[in-house]
Amino acid sequence: MNRINPLHIALLMVALFGFVIYQHLLLQKKITQKEQRVLQLQEIGKEIATLKNYWGDKRLQKRRIEEIINTPFIKKFVTNTKQNRDRYKVWLKNIDAKNADRIADKIFNSFVKIGSFSIQREGKDKISMEVEFRL
């Protein structure tokens, strides 16, 4: 009984080897999951950078706003514009219902940041609009 049975040592080594293999496979699985998550985050980062460049460029926003304002059917209603450092305000007067709908569609379907948009009735069939764009 004083001697160690070699069969016990072999079984212990097999069990230890099996445990190490099992832990290695679990670690590999976690690493692949983390790598996939990193790739997803990189794609999200690229998308955020693209959107930031698209929406964050003040010159591009200003150009889009000026394109909207200089559209022929909108330009005839523009009475005043005011430009601050980060805001662009436009007042439109004497607009009939048909043109008001076209103007609102043009503004809301454009890629511009709108700070505020208000409509006020001027008469029975005329309205005025005040639109504040953000740069």
Image (cartoon, helix red, strand yellow):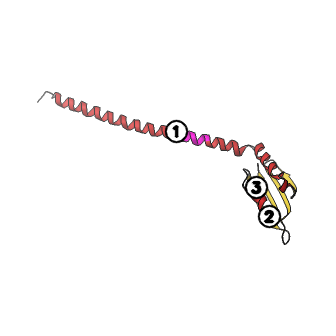
Q: Pointer 1: residues within 10 angstroms few (<14), some, or many (20+)?
A: few
Magenta segment includes 123: no
Identify the secondary structure beneath mark 2.
helix
Task: Name which of mark 1 and mark 3 comes first in the sequence.
Answer: 1
Residue 7: which disc?
none
**Where is mark 3, residue-wise?**
107
- Residue at x 21% of width, y 32% of height: 11
**Where is mark 2, residue-wise?**
98
Residue 38: which disc?
1
Q: Amino acid at mark 1?
A: Val
The reply, left or right, for residue 110 in relation to residue 44 is: right
Residue 74: percent from the left, percent from the top? 83, 56
Identify the secondary structure beneath mark 1.
helix
Residue 16: percent from the left, percent from the top? 27, 33
Q: Amino acid at mark 3?
A: Ile
135 and 79: which is toward the camera:
79
